[in-house]
Image (cartoon, helix red, strand yellow):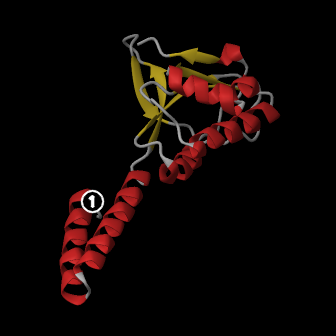
Amino acid sequence: VWNTYAAERAAMVATFALTLLIPLHWAIFAGVALTLLLFVYSSSSQVRLVRIVRGPDGGFEEQAAPVRLPSDDVTALHAHGNAFFAAIASLEALLPATEGARNAVVIFGLRGRESLTTSGIVMLERYARKLQAGGNKLMLVGVEPRVRREFDRTGVTSLLGEENIFASSS
C-alpha cells in the first residue's frame, strides 16, 4: 500500500541519488518536481464522496454515496479531500449516475471551500446539465462569498438559478 510517508521517503531517496549523478541544482529541481507529482497523485486518490442522511437518533450521519441517483428523492452529498484540479476527475467519477433518474434533487455541500478551481466549476456545470436533462435539480449549500462571486462570474448562478445556491451560515 502506497502511503504519504512512503512517498516522501521515496522522493528524498531519489533526490539524494540524483545529487550523486547530476548537478546539484538539477537534482533539487527534480526532487521538487517528484514531490509535487507525488502530492498531486496522493491528494487526488484521497477524495471521498459521502451521502448525508438523518440517523435514527435524529442527527445526521455519513453513508456511502449512491452509485445511481434515486428518482423522486433528495440526495445530500459532501466531498472530503482536496478540491483542486487533479482531484476533480476522481470526484466526478464518484458522483451518482443521473441516467434514468427523474424528479431528483442533489444537494451538494460546499461548506469550508474558500475557492474552487476552474476544473471544479466546470465539473459542477457538467453535472448540473446532466441532472437538468433528466428533469432533476442541483442545489449548492454552504457557499462562501468568494465562491458565490466565482459562480456569478462564470454563469453557474444563472445555470442553477439564484434560488438553488445557499450561502454559508458561518
Query: Who is closer to the viewer here, 62 or 118?
Result: 118
Where is residue 59 drawn, in percent x and y? 38, 13
Query: Who is closer to the viewer here, 97 or 141?
Result: 141
Using residue 22 as the reference point, say whether residue 57 is left or right of it. Answer: right
Where is residue 3 drawn, in percent x and y? 27, 59
Using residue 106 as the reference point, say whether residue 17 is left or right of it. Answer: left
- Density class for disc 1 (Cα within 10 Å; few <14, some 14-19, many ≥20) is few
Query: Which residue is denoted by mark 1 in the rendering?
Result: 3
Using residue 122 as the reference point, say whether residue 142 is left or right of it. Answer: left
Q: Residue at x 80, y 28 (%)?
A: 135
Using residue 23 as the reference point, say whether residue 74 is left or right of it. Answer: right
Circle 1 — which element? loop
Q: Residue at x 26, y 76 (%)?
A: 25
Q: Is residue 107 in sight in this rendering? A: no
Report which quarter residue 20 is drawn in. bottom left
Query: Who is closer to the viewer here, 95 or 39?
Result: 39
* Depicted 97 relative to depicted 4: above or below: above
Query: Who is closer to the viewer here, 53 or 45?
Result: 45
Q: Is residue 29 in sight in this rendering? A: yes
